[in-house]
Image (cartoon, rainbow, N blue to C red):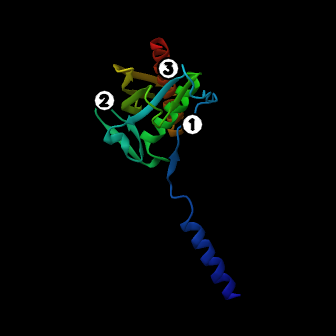
């Protein structure tokens, strides 16, 4: 009987050690619209999303929250499931693919006749007043012509908490992708 109690105690202790460590991991949701990719044919527009860069304070694992006009907190228990710059790039490719039917949008080079998009995100965080902030600038190389546009979007969260903040950040990032897409269609 003592043997079984020892085994049960050991199993209970191992279960406790592998249980929740108090950390929550977040991934930006993908666009709800399916991406419509066209095969590369003459006349098809090609867009390479070369890079989405983030500053050091956003490049770590922790989700960022602004607590005052000059203070930011980087969470230690609410973390990004994968690097934020990769998530932003992947969701941007997905959102642009959905917003630009007939275009081939990729995170890899597509050939010689491609447009090249680089995005520098300077803000991607929640704020003390219940809003999320998404800001930065993008640079498009369109047929040798450089087009640079800043962006700054704010949207109020509908609920409290990190889940709502991440969903609202994703919603605002999708809005910026829609804005980029509309400007791209005007060029072509």
Q: Earlier in the sequence, mark 1 or mark 3?
A: 1
For the residues marked 3 and 2, what is the alpha-carbon distance in whole angstroms?
32 Å
Mark 3 or mark 2, whichever is nearer to me: 3
For the residues marked 2 and 1, what is the alpha-carbon distance in whole angstroms?
28 Å
How many numbered marks appear? 3
Residue 12 pos. (x, y %):
62, 72
For the residues marked 1 and 3, what is the alpha-carbon distance in whole angstroms?
19 Å
How many neighbours does mark 1 have within 10 angstroms: few (below 14), some (14-19), or many (20 or more)?
few
Report the front residue among 118 and 137. Answer: 118
At 45% from the left edge and 15% from the top edge, which residue is drawn?
183
What's the mark number on residue 181?
3
Look at the numbered discs 2 and 1 and tell me whether their residues touch, using CB distance below 8 Å: no
Residue 23 pos. (x, y %):
49, 52
Report the front residue among 104 and 32. Answer: 104
Q: Which residue is mark 2?
A: 69
Mark 1 or mark 3, whichever is nearer to me: 3
How many neighbours does mark 2 have within 10 angstroms: few (below 14), some (14-19), or many (20 or more)?
few
Left or right: 9, with 113 as reference point: right
Q: Is residue 158 visible?
A: no
Residue 124 pos. (x, y %):
41, 33
Q: Which residue is mark 1?
A: 29
How many neighbours does mark 3 have within 10 angstroms: few (below 14), some (14-19), or many (20 or more)?
some
Residue 179 pos. (x, y %):
47, 18
Q: Is residue 17 above or below residue 168?
A: below
Q: Residue furthest bottom?
A: 2
Q: Quadrant of the N terminus?
A: bottom right
Determine the secondary structure under disc 2: loop
Image quadrant where residue 150 sits: top left
């Amino acid at each position: 009987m003592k043997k079984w109690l020892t085994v049960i105690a050991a199993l209970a202790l191992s279960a406790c050690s592998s249980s929740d460590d108090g950390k929550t991991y977040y991934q930006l949701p993908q666009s709800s619209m399916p991406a419509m990719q066209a095969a590369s044919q003459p006349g098809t527009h090609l867009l390479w999303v070369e890079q989405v860069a983030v500053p050091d304070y956003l490049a770590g694992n922790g989700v960022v929250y602004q607590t005052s006009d000059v203070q930011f907190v980087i969470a230690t228990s609410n973390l990004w499931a994968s690097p934020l710059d990769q998530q932003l790039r992947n969701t941007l490719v997905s959102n642009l693919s959905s917003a630009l039917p007939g275009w081939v949008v990729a995170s890899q080079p597509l050939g010689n006749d491609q447009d090249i998009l680089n995005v520098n995100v300077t803000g991607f965080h929640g704020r003390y007043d219940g809003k999320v902030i998404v800001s930065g600038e993008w640079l498009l190389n369109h047929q040798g012509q450089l087009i640079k546009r800043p962006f700054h979007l704010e949207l109020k969260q509908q609920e409290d908490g990190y889940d709502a903040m991440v969903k609202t950040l994703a919603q605002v990032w999708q809005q910026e992708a829609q804005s980029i897409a509309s400007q791209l269609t005007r060029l072509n």
